[in-house]
Structures are given as C-alpha cells and as structure tokens.
Image (cartoon, helix red, strand yellow):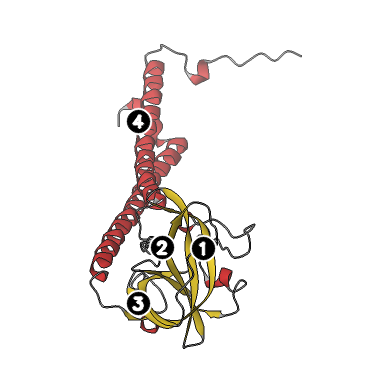
C-alpha cells in the first residue's frame, strides 16, 4: 500500500471503514423494504379496484356469510333484511369535493343485531330536517360492506362535541352509546341512495389505498438511498482530505505532528 494511505490501517480508520461497510447495506435494505411496502400498496389498490369493478356485477351475498370484514370482504356486495330504526347524521363528509353529511339509519335484523346503513349523502350542514325518513315496514337492503371506522381513517375526525343525533365515526364502539341495539361490527352503503340523496361509494379497505401513507413509503425509499449515497460521499471526502494531508506532510509542506511545538502555557 502506498505510504500516503498508511492511515487507513489506524484504529480510527478501521472504525470508519467498519461503520461504512455496515451503514451502506443497512440503508439499501431499508430503502428496498420501504419500496416493497409501496409496491404492495399499489398491488392492493389495483386488486381492490378490480374487485370493486367486479362486485358491481356480482350477486349480493347474505350479510352473515361475509363477516367479519377484512381485505377480502370489504367492498363486497351484501344484502340484509329488517326494519329501519334509529336515524343519525354523520357530518363533515365530502363527496366530489363538496362538504355534506351522511344519513345513517340502523337496520334491525332478525338476528337481534342492528346494521348501520348509509342511505345516502346530502350537501351542506348536517340537519335532521333535510334527511328523508326511512321506509316503513320490512325492507331488503343491498350495498357495499365496510369495516368499522376509526378516527383518522379517510379523514374521519374524532367523536365529541356533536349535537344529539349525530356521530363522527361509523363503528359499533361509537354507536353503542347512541342506540339501544346490539350492533354488527360493520356497516354498508346502499347501491342506490334513498329519496333524492346521492349514493356514497365504497371506500378501499384500510391499508390498500394510494393515500398519503403509501407515498410516504415511496419518500422514505428515496431518503434511505440518499443516506447510502451520502455515506459513500463522506467516506471519499474524508479519504481525500486525509490523503492530501499525509502527502503534504511527506513533502514537508506542513510540519509533521512530532515537529509541531507544544503550546506554551502561561503560569
């Protein structure tokens, strides 16, 4: 090895080299992992889109056969039979970039449980006077099966501070305190909205949509590869600076460490 590069054998540079040899594979691994997560979300989104397209032509299946709700059953067409009961409003919901609210009615089924049914969407501020009354008598409903919401999903806000007769989250955990029924841990949105309302499209299962979290994975991918490149850049920069300093010392352009006079300390 050329004398200029003898410093690579010092303990300090052994530590630097070991760090670089560990840091680069780690950054590449983490970048590849984040990229695989993004690709997985893309595949899930494509599968969910294809499933939604096929579901529109699929025969609705009985609700009980599609529970519990998971990635395979979310968005599938189901049917249920019963009598409508308590009606609630879900404010702060957008459709085609317009603000409005859902009209949510509890369907009391023969199983003894109630199924939350989003009968449609209306624009403007949530107002019970605007919401059409549900049909009377026994009805059969058909719509897309949805998993219970949690605050933060699809822009859903936390429950609290709402007037009586309204709920921010469509889930059994939030509705159990508002209605006197046992509830399914699921809800549906009707294929065809009732009485002048607009139908609410089914949302993609949690963790499958190309949302902000998915593109965060893509951003993290780029960051990890940038980190790997930065480690390599800094290693070469340190190597060049130290090699230049060693070369200058060998040519006598700068004093060697042992020739440097010790600092004078005044008493």
Real-space Cα distance between discs 2 and 3? 19 Å
Q: Secondary structure at mark 2?
A: loop
- Give the vertical position of 170 relative to 226 (above or below): below
Real-space Cα distance between discs 3 and 4? 62 Å
Q: State which tag comes first along the sequence, 1 or 3.
A: 3
Q: What residue is disc 1 on?
A: 150
User: Which residue is painted at 35% across and 32% down in the image?
Assistant: 233
Q: State which tag comes first along the sequence, 1 or 2.
A: 1
Q: Closer to the observer: label 2 or label 3?
A: 3
Q: Secondary structure at mark 4?
A: helix
Quick check: marks 2 and 3 in contact, CB under 8 Å? Answer: no
Q: Closer to the observer: label 1 or label 3?
A: 3
Real-space Cα distance between discs 4 and 1? 49 Å
User: Which residue is painted at 62% across and 72% down in the image?
Assistant: 177
Q: State which tag comes first along the sequence, 3 or 4.
A: 3
Q: Quadrant of residue 194?
A: bottom left
Q: Which mark is residue 206?
A: 2
Q: Nearer the viewer, residue 183 or 191?
A: 191
Using a 10 Å C-alpha cutoff, classify the residue at mark 1 as few (fewer than 14 neighbours), some (14 to 19) or many (20 or more): some
User: Which residue is painted at 30% across and 62% down in the image?
Assistant: 44
Real-space Cα distance between discs 1 and 3? 22 Å
Q: Secondary structure at mark 3?
A: strand
Q: What residue is disc 4 on?
A: 236
Q: Closer to the observer: label 3 or label 4?
A: 3
Quick check: marks 4 and 2 in contact, CB under 8 Å? Answer: no
Q: State which tag comes first along the sequence, 2 or 3.
A: 3
Q: State which tag comes first along the sequence, 4 or 2.
A: 2
Using a 10 Å C-alpha cutoff, classify the residue at mark 4 as few (fewer than 14 neighbours), some (14 to 19) or many (20 or more): few
Quick check: marks 4 and 1 in contact, CB under 8 Å? Answer: no
Q: What residue is disc 3 on?
A: 78
């Amino acid at each position: 090895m050329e004398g200029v590069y003898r410093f690579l054998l010092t303990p300090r540079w052994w530590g630097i080299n070991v760090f670089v040899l560990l840091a680069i594979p780690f950054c590449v691994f983490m970048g590849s992992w984040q990229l695989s997560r993004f690709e997985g979300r893309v595949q899930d989104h494509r599968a969910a889109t294809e499933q939604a397209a096929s579901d529109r032509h699929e025969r609705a299946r009985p609700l009980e056969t599609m529970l519990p709700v998971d990635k395979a059953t979310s968005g599938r067409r189901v049917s249920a039979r019963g009598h409508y009961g308590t009606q609630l409003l879900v404010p702060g919901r957008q459709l085609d970039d317009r603000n409005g609210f859902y009209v949510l009615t509890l369907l009391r089924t023969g199983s003894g449980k109630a199924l939350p049914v989003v009968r449609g969407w209306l624009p403007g501020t949530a107002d019970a006077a605007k919401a059409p009354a549900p049909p009377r008598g026994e009805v059969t409903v058909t719509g897309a099966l949805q998993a219970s919401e949690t605050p933060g999903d699809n822009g859903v806000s936390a429950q609290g501070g709402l007037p009586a007769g309204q709920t921010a989250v469509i889930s059994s955990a939030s509705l159990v305190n508002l209605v006197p029924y046992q509830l399914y841990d699921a809800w549906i949105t009707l294929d065809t909205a009732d009485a002048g309302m607009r139908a609410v499209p089914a949302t993609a299962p949690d963790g499958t949509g190309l949302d902000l979290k998915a593109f965060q994975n893509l951003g993290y991918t780029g960051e990890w590869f940038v980190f790997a490149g930065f480690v390599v850049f800094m290693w070469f920069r340190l190597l060049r600076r130290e090699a230049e300093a060693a070369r200058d010392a060998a040519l006598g352009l700068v004093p060697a460490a042992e020739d440097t006079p010790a600092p004078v300390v005044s008493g």
